Every structure is written in C-alpha cells, then in structure tokens.
Image: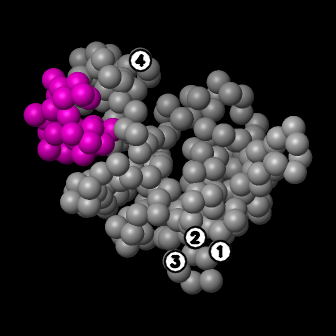
Amino acid sequence: MEILKAINVEKVYNSKNEELSVHALTGIDLSVMKGDFMVIAGASGSGKTALLNILGTLDIPTKGEVFLEGDNLSKFSSKELSEIRLNKMGFIFQAFNLIPVLTALENIEFTMMLRNIPEKTRHEKAIALMAELGIDELKDKRPNQMSGGQQQRVAVARAIVNEPLICLADEPTANLDSKTSSNLLDLMQRLNEDKNITFIFSSHDNQIKERAKRLIYLKDGKIESENGKS
C-alpha cells in the first residue's frame, strides 16, 4: 500500500546572487510503500537530507507535490503540517536531539504529552516500550549520563512510541561506533519486521545500505538508481 508519494519534486535554495542558488533536488519521483525499509544514499551534497526533510514535511518543495495517504501536503497550513508530524511521523537525528533536562523516560513521554495523552497512559506506554527495547535501566538517566548508543536508542523509542505511519532517520549512525550502529540497526529492523513500521533513512553508512529493502541513490539532486540498478 502506497503511503507517501513525491511527484516531480524540485528544491532550490535561493541566494540574492542567483548564480549562487543551489538546486538541491530536480525532478524527484518516489513512492513509499507501507512497511518499506528504504535508504536514500549518495555522496555529500547529493540531496539526501533535502529529500528526507521534504518527505517529512520539515521543508516544502520549490516545485512539485508530495502526497501523504492520498492528501496533497501543499494544501495544508504550517499548523496542520505540524499536527501531521506529531501524529503520523517519527524522527531520528544523528545528533540524538534529546531534551537535556529530561530523563530518558520523560523524553520518550514528551511527544505523547504534546498529544495530550493522559499522564498515566503515557507513563505506562513508555515504560512498556523501554522494557521491550531493552533500555528500561535508563529510565531515570538524563542524556549526559548515557552513551551515544543509549541516547540513540532512547531517540528511537521516542520516535516510535506514538506508532507513527513513517519513521524518518537522518544519518542515525553517524555518531556511533560500528558495533553500536549494528545493534541499533538490529533494533530498527526488528521494529520494521514485527510492527511493520515504515523507515526512511538518509545515510551513506554501508551497514544501513546493506539492510535496505529499497536503496535509492541520488546524484546531483536526481535519482540515479534504485537498488543499485540504473
């Protein structure tokens, strides 16, 4: 089932000097299916993060259209897009982006609090998820008391606790060693297979590319190939 679709998407970052304007994406056509474990790969500057940001409604295309569950996202206001991100998307960043003053448990509960889920319900849900992911011993620790791998596991839990339609991960292993990266990817692969959570990665990490169900290569802002076949 198709859940997300980009049609002829272009992204230009304009400069006052038009010669310095950057064409980050050109003519992108892409469909995302329910249960995909998709990796968007390519050299630095190929447009990976720009495309991920547009698919995740963190940015809007200069031209073209993006549809989520058949709805044209260009028709939505900024407030409505914010609601879509909160209710239908989870985000994992290379810098973890945990809130420093909150414990791991509170960080995971945070997006549920924004959705006005009752305190008892969100607490029970977060505790259960931490146990399932094997990070329950971290519940009272703040980010500065955790390793990078532990912080990223908490970030994954925060991203999926609302059972999002899509989870978007921008270079999620960039700050981790290879063993920690492998363990984290095992976790995300299990979530994809067991819970059918759709993952879209932006990454140049070979470990992630090797696990992809779909591998999209970008070059100079265009899709060069899919699954390594031009």
Residue 227 badge: 3
- Three-letter code, disc 4: Asn
Give how far apart the Cα atoms at labels 4 and 1 are: 43 Å
Q: Secondary structure at mark 3?
A: loop
At x 44% / y 22%, what residue is drawn? Answer: 115
Quick check: marks 4 and 1 in contact, CB under 8 Å?
A: no
Closer to the camera in the image, 148 or 3:
148
In the displayed structure, 179 sits above or below 117; it is below
Q: Secondary structure at mark 4?
A: loop
- Three-letter code, disc 3: Asn
- Three-letter code, disc 2: Tyr
Q: Is residue 230 magenta?
A: no
Q: Position of residue 130 (x, y in %)?
A: 19, 37
Judge from the rendering whether residue 173 lies leftward or rightward of residue 88; answer left or right.
left
Residue 116 badge: 4
Q: Quick one: label 4 or label 1, which is nearer the N terminus? A: 4
Give how far apart the Cα atoms at labels 2 and 4 are: 39 Å
